Image (cartoon, rainbow, N blue to C red):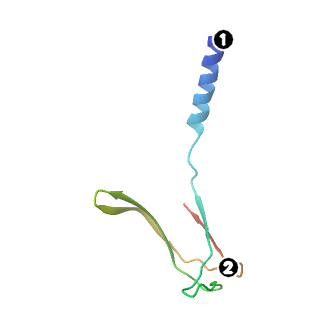
């Protein structure tokens, strides 16, 4: 029984060692203008930032800018590395 527990613990440890976070993040949005109308077939600017608050001021850890073009489906799909 002790041997079975040891083997089971080793298998769980090895399986968790192989686990890792995904390399990409998928983001989807519907773009609207100031009048709440859908924006289609126009290039829009989109900036993605990861901001942390260390102390009194925020710090940007990661920032990337995209220029997606919402097609007739009226949505933007972006893969963020």
22, above or below 61, in the image? above
Label 2 residue SS: loop
Q: Secondary structure at mark 1?
A: loop
Q: Nearer the viewer, residue 3 or 56?
A: 56
Q: Nearer the viewer, residue 33 or 9?
A: 33
Residue marked by disc 1: 1
Q: Farthest bottom residue?
A: 35
Furthest residue toward right: 73
Question: Label 2 belongs to which residue?
Answer: 74
Across and down, in percent, residue 56 comes to: 28, 60
| Residue found at x 57% / y 29% | 13
Q: Residue furthest left?
A: 56
Q: Is residue 54 left or right of residue 31?
A: left
Crowdedness near tag 1: few (<14), some (14–19) or many (≥20) residues, C-alpha within 10 Å: few
Res 5 quadrant in image: top right
Quarter holding the C terminus is bottom right
Measured Cα–Cα span from mark 1 to mark 2: 60 Å
Q: Residue at x 63, y 19 (%)?
A: 7
Against 14, residue 70 (above or below) is below
For this view, does 64 lie left or right of residue 79? left
Q: Residue at x 56, y 48 (%)?
A: 21
Question: x, y percentage for residue 16?
Answer: 58, 35
Residue occupying the point 55% across, 81% down: 44
Residue 17 is situated, as x and y percent measured from the top left of the image, at: 56, 35
Find residue 34 and report its image quarter. bottom right
Q: Residues within 10 Å of mark 2 (few under 14, many from 20)?
A: some
Query: Tag count in the figure?
Result: 2
Return the disc, 1 or 2, that comes first in the chain's sequence: 1
């Amino acid at each position: 029984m002790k041997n079975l527990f040891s083997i089971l613990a080793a298998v769980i440890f090895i399986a968790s060692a192989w686990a890792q976070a995904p390399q990409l993040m998928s983001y989807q949005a519907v773009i609207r203008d100031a009048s709440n109308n859908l924006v289609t077939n126009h290039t829009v600017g989109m900036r993605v930032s990861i901001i942390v608050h260390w102390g009194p001021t925020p710090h940007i850890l990661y920032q990337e800018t995209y220029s997606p073009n919402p097609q007739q489906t009226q949505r933007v799909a972006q893969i963020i590395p």
